[in-house]
Image (spheres, rainbow, N blue to C red):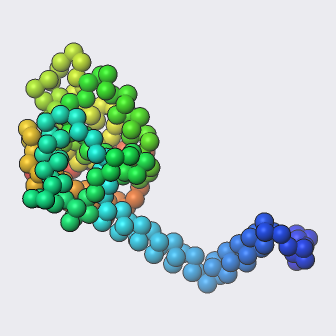
Amino acid sequence: MEGGENYTVFNSRTLVDMVGDVTDEALKATKMKQLIGTLGGRFFNWAQRKSLFPLHLGIKCCALEMAAAGGPRFDAERFGVIFRSSPRQCDVMLVNGPISKKFADPIVRLWEQMPEPKWCIAMGECAISGGPYFQSYNILEGVDTVIPVDVYIPGCPPRPEALIDGFGKLREKIIRIGAVPSQERPNDAPIIIGED
């Protein structure tokens, strides 16, 4: 045995180490490890884009359009968009209103509580640029000043169909770049709905 390892007396930890060593070497020798990694990555990418969980966060009037998109008429759930109320279960932050300077810290805290990979959609003029509160003393000029945005949905307020289209564009982006953590994609250009 290499390294003088003695596997005659087994306990649970040494058994796991031995099986791990043998399995890892066998997988490397047959190139199965690379195949499993590739297939696992593709499966994870498919699962991520087919089940987007946006944070159930309503800030202002665009929250009504978000609620309408999740309601029975537009039924965003048939597209795999399921609104969740805990940031620890979400992978999409949907910002749908103006961000005041007082509310910037809670938004960043919610963003940091979400697991990687995570995505952000800015919905409506208030979230994109401040809207009618542009250059106001207490409203940020867009949520992209505090967190990175992947998809912009312009409008005041945008229709539920535009929100569903935004989730479709986010799916295309996930297909294109994969499940890359948000810190590792700073140069990735955001998508603007309506620009073709």
Identify which residue is drawn at 57% across, 81% down: 32
Corner quadrant of residue 170: bottom left
Q: In this view, does 93 lie above or below 34?
A: above
**Closer to the camera, 136 or 110?**
110
163 to the left or right of 177: left
Image quadrant holding the C terminus, namely bottom left
**Closer to the camera, 179 or 92?**
92
Of all residues, the one furthest to the bottom in this rendering is 30
Residue 128 visible? The answer is yes
Residue 184 visible? The answer is no
Of all residues, the one furthest to the top in this rendering is 137
Corner quadrant of residue 80: bottom left
Image quadrant holding the N terminus, namely bottom right
Identify which residue is drawn at 8% across, 38% down: 156
**Closer to the camera, 35 or 73?**
73
What percent of the width, then of the height, locates residue 189? 27, 48
Identify which residue is drawn at 21% across, 15% down: 137
